[in-house]
Image: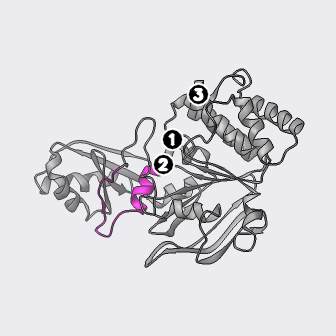
Amino acid sequence: MSDAVISIERLRKNFGPTTAVDDVSFSVSAGSVVGLLGPNGAGKTTLINCLTTLLTPDGGTATVGGRDLLADPHGVRARIAVTGQFAAVDETLTGRENLVFFGRLLGLAKPRAAARAEELLDRFGLTESAGRPVQQYSGGMRRKLDLAVGLVVPRPVLVLDEPTTGLDPRSRETLWDAVRDLAADGMAILLTTQYLDEADELADRIVVIDHGRVIAEGTPRELKQQTGGSVCEVILADDSVRARAAELLAVTGPVNVRDDCLVVPVSGMEDLGGIIAALNAGGIRADDVAVHPPTLNDVFFALTADRTGTTAPTAGSTAPAPGRTVPEARA
């Protein structure tokens, strides 16, 4: 795309015989948010580490803000702001002191660093608490300060690595608003998140990777349409027969096993009869059967189903409140 600020073409990273990132290509445009989703071991973190120059890719190309990842890693670093899972600020300093300190560290003159600190404190609603030590801040305030620190020197690209992990619903909403404002200002934002509702709220496009490869890409609406018209959730009266029930229902389509239910794509209410008939034929009783439009949860589990056509529950796949999560990708 002509307005792509991040452009990744066939990027590859190996760890010995293991290919963690395999021929990955996608782009992020100015003023947009791209969500990067993937299960455990998908290669999401490795990809981010390559893009932020922490790792050197073994193949492919990438440019960030017009700078080549391999030829000019320093130029790439100068164009990326990164906010990780945990606030990287000094808790003994005040919010204002943290911002001035990082401004000076990044080469701003003292008056400019002080002025920039006030701009960011106002932007993120931290002016009233600016004189307090960060150790007295709430989790949401720390995350906002951490995001502000990454923006002390304006950059065209923002990488958000699970920015709302552990935050309460109100703090998440506040941070979401800040991300939307940054995109509206023209930043290109790459978001990795375990919260599927977060990706649905913020991302203009979503890239799903599994086993190091891109397996789907599109808007949240386009990805939801891939699962079919609707999905049917079946809650069994006896969980001990879940595997047998999944086998019976597999004849109607791919079955995902998650949380306390089985999930089957359906065309509409007319498919309910076949599902109930299949269960009755196996002598299996359901406590509840419900049909609803597909969500990103359904998309994720459908796309990452294993070769048997079912997806077993994965460690971390049940979300802590609030919201369902995608298991954190590590490679």
The residue sitting at the front extreme is 92
Q: Is residue 152 visible?
A: no
Up the image or down, 147 lies above or below 59; here it is above
In this figure, what is the number of numbered marks?
3
What is the number of the mark on residue 165?
1
- Type of residue at label 2? Gln
Q: Which residue is drawn at 48% across and 48% down?
A: 194
Circle 2 residue? 194
The answer to which quarter of the image holds residue 78 is bottom right
How busy is the neighbourhood of tag 1: few (under 14 within 10 Å), some, or many (20 plus)?
some
Residue 99: x %, y % from top left: 74, 36
Q: Mark 2 and mark 3 in contact (Cβ < 8 Å)?
A: no
User: Magenta span covers which residues?
Assistant: 296-315
- Type of residue at label 3? Gln
What colouring does the structure picture have? one colour
C-alpha gap between disc 3 and disc 2: 26 Å
